[in-house]
Image: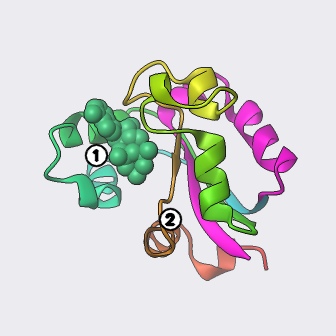
Amino acid sequence: MERTLSIIKPDGVARGLIGEVIKRFEANNLKIVAMKMIYMTKAQAQGFYAVHKERPFFDSLTDFMSSGPIVVLILDGENAIAKYRELMGATNYKETAEGTIRRDFATDIEKNIVHGSDSPESADFEIGYFFNSFEVIC
Ligand code: ADP
Ligand code: MG
């Protein structure tokens, strides 16, 4: 079993897609073991995306991620990291597979509805960024 961090981004929450995204997790054997709605400050978004701090889109991305409430979840399952990346689709929604969350709902390379960890190391960092051990169901 493996754990990964998911975020339903401000565009997903604002557009009423929380249920739609969660439905896809439940239909694909990704078990929700923690979940909450929060509203990040700009500084919190900068800390979360610190790996991208040199990228040209960093300022815009962290403005966007702190522009409204988000839902953060921990998903547990076999190959959860890769499985969720597949469900989510590629960063560029125009180039990603049919039936993925981003292909179905993203409107922009930045406003792409969901985040997912990309490796076991990033999953550990990202889970620890949002959750303490009392908030995770064993
Ligand atoms: P992913 O979310 O697929 O792992 P990255 O980690 O590369 O993608 O980028 C983090 C987020 O930054 C993306 O989900 C997207 O919101 C935004 N982003 C990535 N590339 C660009 C870009 N070229 N222009 C604007 N925003 C981008
Ligand atoms: Mg990434």
Q: Are marks 1 and 2 in contact (CB under 8 Å)?
A: no
Find out if the beta carbon at label 1 lies less than 8 Å from the nearest ligand 1 atom. no
Q: Is residue 65 visible?
A: no
| Span shown in magenta | 1-30
- How packed mark 1 is, by other alpha carbons closer than 10 Å (few <14, some 14-19, many 20 or more), is some
Q: Secondary structure at mark 1?
A: helix
Amino acid type, residue under disc 1 in the picture: Lys
Residue sitting at x 41%, y 21%: 108
Is residue 63 one of those drawn in magenta? no
* Residue in view at x 65 percent, y 33 percent: 100
Q: Residue at x 76, y 34 (%)?
A: 19
Quarter occupied by the C terminus? bottom right
Q: Which residue is mark 1?
A: 42
Q: Earlier in the sequence, mark 1 or mark 2?
A: 1
Is 22 included in the stretch rendered in magenta? Answer: yes
Residue 126 position (above or below residue 95):
below
Where does label 2 land, which residue? Answer: 130
Q: Quadrant of the N terminus?
A: bottom right
* In the displayed structure image, the side of residue 53 where residue 88 appears, left or right: right
Q: Nearer the viewer, residue 135 or 128?
A: 128
Residue 108 left/right relative to 80: left
